[in-house]
Every structure is written in C-alpha cells, then in structure tokens.
Image (spheres, rainbow, N blue to C red):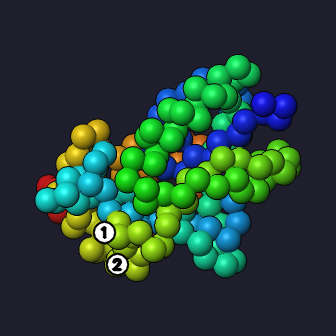
Amino acid sequence: MSQPLWVFGYGSLIWDPGFPVAETQVARMTDWHRSFCMRSIHHRGTPERMGLVLALDRAAGAFCDGVAFRVETGAEDATLQALRARELISSAYLEDWLAVRTRDGRDITALTYVIDPQHEQYCGGLSLSEQADIIAHAVGGRGTNRAYLEATAAHLAQLGIADADLDALVIMVQRITA
C-alpha cells in the first residue's frame, strides 16, 4: 500500500483491535451514529438467543466519535484479512472507506464497517429498554453481551468520548441482572 491503512473503530475494535497499531487518534465520523442495531448470532449471541452488537447506522447530521488506528507498515494485508474474517462473518456489515477527522484536525480516509440496513440482522429502532433486555441475557462465542457493552462504554469514557445511550444501557442492564 502506498498510503497508510487507517481503520475506524467505534465498538469492540476500540478495546480489542486485533492488529498491530502504529498510531491511535480519537476521531469523528459524520452522518453516521453508533447503535446497537445489529443482531449478533456469533460473537455475542446465538441464532436461538440473539444478542446485539454495535454498528454504524447512517443518519444525516449525526456523528460518531471513535478511534482511528493507523496500522503498522507491513501489516496491512494481514490486518485486512483478519478484519474481514472477524467483521464480515455474517455479511451484516458492509466494508467501506469513509472520511473521519482526528481530534488533532487531520482529515483521513479509514476502513470502516457499517451496517447493511437490508440485512436480516439489522434491527434499528429498538428502544433502549428493548436493547437492555436483549443485552442482559445474550451470550455468544466471544462472551456475554453485557461484557461487550460494559467494555465499550468503559473504554469510551477513558478516551473522553461521551455516549449517553451506552451509559444509560449500562445502568439498565446492571438493574436487570442484579
């Protein structure tokens, strides 16, 4: 690759990128928002008891703050293969190259995984209470849906990224599971 490979993370990639990172920058993507709008049948749920995972859902005027990772030089091909195996497991995500702006003011293009709103796993529009009930009870190949939510919310907080919906969901799920 002649250009550096950047990857935008907004969920588990923030705390578990799974590839060698040369640089990390908090970044913002516009016209998309982070949402528990994808039913998980592999990593955080099963076909019998689906969980929810985060995806970027298109919404004009919205934004998503996350992390832009610059992949170490020489690891680009292996990173692409690993990300595709992880993120495209059920074809509910679409791979796209989208513009993000880093906190330090750089405009970059980053590999990003966004939801396919036509896919059967898409479930945009669930209320926070519906999301909390699903997240509180689902478990998949990578663990509990609750752990996924809590890890994402905690890492966003450490980075100084506010997400009121995730913070509310953490409290709601804790009440359900108490």
Front-most of 99 and 104?
Answer: 99
Q: Quadrant of residue 135?
A: bottom left
Front-most of 80 and 67?
Answer: 80
The answer to whether the residue labelled 1 contacts the one labelled 2, judged by CB atoms less than 8 Å apart, is yes
Q: Secondary structure at mark 2?
A: loop
Residue 114 lies, in percent from the top left, at 55, 60
Residue located at (28% from left, 74% from top): 129
115 vs 132, left or right, is right
Q: Relative to residue 59, is residue 45 depicted above or below?
A: above
Residue 61 lies, in percent from the top left, at 69, 77
Label 2 crowd (10 A; few <14 / some 14-19 / many >=20): few
Q: CA distance from mark 1 to mark 2?
A: 6 Å
Q: Quadrant of residue 151?
A: top left
Front-most of 61 and 157?
Answer: 61
Q: Secondary structure at mark 1?
A: helix
Residue at label 2? 127
Tag on residue 131? 1
**Three-letter amino acid code of the residue under disc 2:** Ser
Tag on residue 140? none
